[in-house]
Amino acid sequence: MKIHLQLTALAMGLTMAANAQVNSSPTEIINKKRKCGSEIPPPEWNAEFSKQVATYKADMMSSKTATANYTISVIFHIISGAQAVGVYPNLSQAQINSQITVLNNDFAGAGANMNVLTATAFSAVGAANCGVTFCLAKKNEHGQTLAEPGIDRVSYIAKGWLNPNSYSSNATLKTFVDGTVKPNTIWDVNRYLNIWTTDVNPSVLLLGYATFPLNAALVGLPGGGTSTTDGVWLASLCTGSINVGSYKGRTCSHEVGHWLGLRHIGGDAAPDGDCLADDYCADTPPQRGTLNENGQNYGCGPYPLNATGSRSCSAAPNGSMYMNFMDYSDDNCVCMFTPDQKTRVQVALSPQPNGGFYRSLLTQAATTLCNNPSAAPITLVTVPNIICDTAAVCTTTDNFTTGNPIPTYSWSSSPSAGVTFSPNSISAAPSISFASTGVYTITCAATNSVGTNSAVTTVSVNGCAIGIAKHSLLKTYISLQPNPSSGKVSLITSLPSSQTLEVSVRNALGQLMISSKHKDVTNSSIELDLTTYSAGVYFVTIANGSEKLVKRLILNK
């Protein structure tokens, strides 16, 4: 549709049957109508995206650009009450695998239900291959091998959160997900497509929602993703294509479509149900909506749907394209994206300055995140260097060790008397208790089938009689590993409170090489890439506004 209409309302959420039971098996819940809770972007977003589409098409005509193939690494944050893996809503690896298969087939124009399309006049438009492949991430943010590809299991009980199905309205659930779940579990939005799954209360009229792509000119607009909210939320009951009753994974295809810049096929029609609403794609016919249906179709056809009668549009002689993924039709009836929708996907993923939307950054990260060859461990652990207590003190360790297969660990202390590791000395990141003051050398050895590597840390346990203020917070809780390095360096932090850190790297002549700012840092690993710089001595400066720490780094090539 080519006609533009300003939209400011919120789309309603994907609906479920009112008689569904809380925590029921998803096979027992039959969805009567599908809707989507993604917030409709404002006119400024529409104008900017349309401008980028026009530029992209002009470049295609002049052969300045060509259709590209992109790969996006995906992490599913499965939120549950710590049920056994595979027990709803703690979805199994097989169920997540089935969802990735559906995504890849749908965005390649080769998904199920193609018979629905071929039986209509829309077969001339064709199901477009959008040039996108989705892969389950094999590494976490610290480069460590994931035990389950593409899965981050989160217990709301361990986090101290309420059960997601205790929220009984769309608004309260979205507030919980956007304000609590996402910020506390999200992975780097420049490297991963974050997808969250949770159980839902039957009174919540949502099956999914997504954030739209933004660029530098659009930051702050409603509906766009941020570093703490970007991604897709799905109800557990409709995730994947197995063990989900009538659902076949198409809610995810619909929401990822939004995440890549696609609008509803019905254009989120005005309540008066006219034919003027727009999805900004010329090869999708207009649809007439009603006050409650908001321009979308439900169920499964039949073809031709709304070609005549009170819901027909004169510009749509073949009726509605109800089999499009961006309509609300049933999973067993949708099967296509159009060529113009493909163009919007390509624009969302194309690199600066052509497309300008931040989604392009993800495609650059997928090469390393989705491929995980065998590698010996590189041991990166943190233990506070100074512990201010008089006796019987305990410190918590953090482990950012890499390696594939996943390493096993062995922790030890010298001296060892009075030192205990909990739950044991072979845990990945045990807490360490010291029975008395003193200086201890803590060693962590990581081993896999490829090799062994160790990290050694000195811990001073004392009463700190001179006062904690005289001890540098940054010096105590920040380390640089490995040092010397061949170029890949990790700034490992185990700060007792959240800090904003400014990090810079200068060469021996004082010339600035790298500068970055990091908010809300506590236990983390800040990656510094110096692989393109020559061997020599460099100085890494870390500042938090009240103090500054300078560490000497040696690069060996």
Image (cartoon, rainbow, N blue to C red):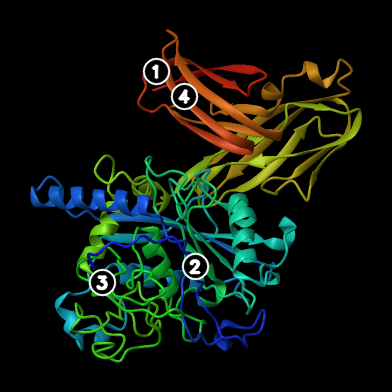
Q: Which residue is mark 1?
A: 535
Marks 1 and 4 close (CB-CB < 8 Å): no
Q: State how far apart marks 1 and 2 are (Cα).
A: 52 Å
Q: State how far apart marks 4 and 2 are (Cα).
A: 39 Å
Instruction: Please tell me whether mark 1 or mark 4 is closer to you in this view.
Output: 4
Instruction: Please tell me whether mark 3 or mark 2 is closer to you in this view.
Output: 2
Left/right of residue 494 with respect to residue 517 in the rendered view: right
Residue 343 appears in the picture as rendered:
yes
**Residue 324, picture quadrant:** bottom left
Judged from the image, the secondary structure of the residue bearing numbered disc 2 is loop
Image height of 73 relative to 188, above or below: below
Q: Which residue is mark 2?
A: 37
Left/right of residue 443 with respect to residue 251 in the rendered view: right
Judged from the image, the secondary structure of the residue bearing numbered disc 3 is loop
Name the residue located 72 percent from the left edge and 19 percent from the top edge: 472
Q: Which residue is mark 3?
A: 109
